[in-house]
Image (spheres, rainbow, N blue to C red):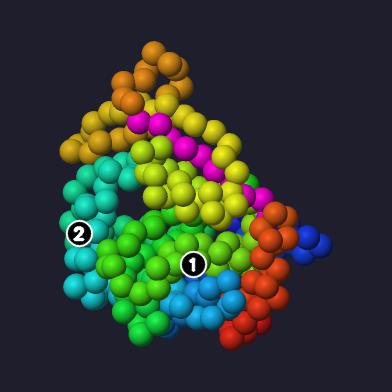
Amino acid sequence: MPAPRLSLICWGDNVIGAERSAEIIRRMKGIPGGSGMRFPIRDEGLNVIGYLRGFDKSRLGDGALIETMARAHTQNKENFMTQFDVTPANKRYWLENSVLANDKKMLFLVETQNGRVVGQDGFTIREDGVFVSDASMKWERDGHPALFLRNFYERAAMCFVLLGCVGAEITFFKKNIATMLNVKRLGARKTGEYPLVKSAENGKIIYAKADDPSQINTGEILIEYHMQKDDFLASHKNLVEHPCWEAYSWD
C-alpha cells in the first residue's frame, strides 16, 4: 500500500495537515461510532436561532428521514448539475459512501430551535484548500427565516478557522434568483458565468461547462461566486472570537 499523501493547508500563521482536517470532520460525523456533533446557528447578535447536526451513521436507519431527503432532492433536482429522480435506496447509498466515507465532505441536518429537522446543508473541501458550499436543501417551511442564510456563516467559520481553508466557492444556475440574492448578501464576489452543455445518460440529465461554444445546446448558465478567507474574517470577527464549536475540545 502506498504511503498516504499529506497536503498542507495554511491559515494565517497556522498550518493544518490534511489528516488533522479529516480527523475533525470524522468527529463531526460521530465516526467511528458516536453521534454527530451539534453546532448552534446564530443571528448577527449571536442569539441561537437553530442548529447544525452532523449526519452520522445511525441516521442511515431512519427510513422516514432518508425518504424525506430523497423526495426533497427529486423536487429540487432542477438546481443540480446532475438531475434524476432520487430513491431512498440511492440516497442511502450516497450518504453512506459519498458522505460518511469521504473525509473531505461534511453534511449537516438543519434543525430549528426545538430540534425539528427542516433541511440539510454542507461543504466539500477541495485539494486546493477551497471549500465548496453544497448539498443545500430546505424541505420544511419552519424555523427562523434566516436559518439557511446564517448557517452559511457558521459553516464558513468552521472551514476558514477550524479546518484551515483559504477560500469558498458557491455555484448555482443563473435562473435560481433566490440563491443569487442570498449569496450577494453573504458578501461573496461573482467570478464567472459559464454556458452549459446538456446531455442524457442512464436516465439522468447532466449539465457541464462547455469547452467549446459549438457544444452549447441549452440556455442554462452556471454562476460562480468566491469568498476569500481574509475578507470573511475581517467582516465576521465575532464568529472567530465566539465560534460555534467552542463547546467542544479538539485535542
Q: Is residue 6 visible?
A: no
Q: Is residue 177 visible?
A: yes
- Residue 133 as seen in the image, left or right of residue 98: right
- Residue 56 as seen in the image, left or right of residue 77: right
Q: Is residue 226 magenta?
A: yes
Q: Is residue 202 magenta?
A: no
Residue 38's place in the image compared with 147, above or below, is below
Task: State the image coordinates of residue 21 (x, y, percent, origin top left).
Answer: 60, 65
Query: Which residue type carries mark 2?
Result: Arg
- Residues in magenta, as a range: 220-229
**Earlier sequence position, callout 2 versus callout 1:** 2
Q: Which residue is mark 1?
A: 151
Q: Nearer the viewer, mark 2 or mark 1?
A: 1
Task: State the image coordinates of residue 5 (x, y, percent, origin top left).
Answer: 62, 53
Query: Which residue type carries mark 1?
Result: Asn
For image coordinates 24% across by 59% down, the residue present is 72
Task: State the image coordinates of residue 163 (x, y, percent, origin top left).
Answer: 62, 64
For image coordinates 70% across by 68% down, the residue present is 237
Describe the element under mark 2 as helix, strand or loop: helix
In front here: 181 or 34? 181
Q: Which residue is mark 2?
A: 71
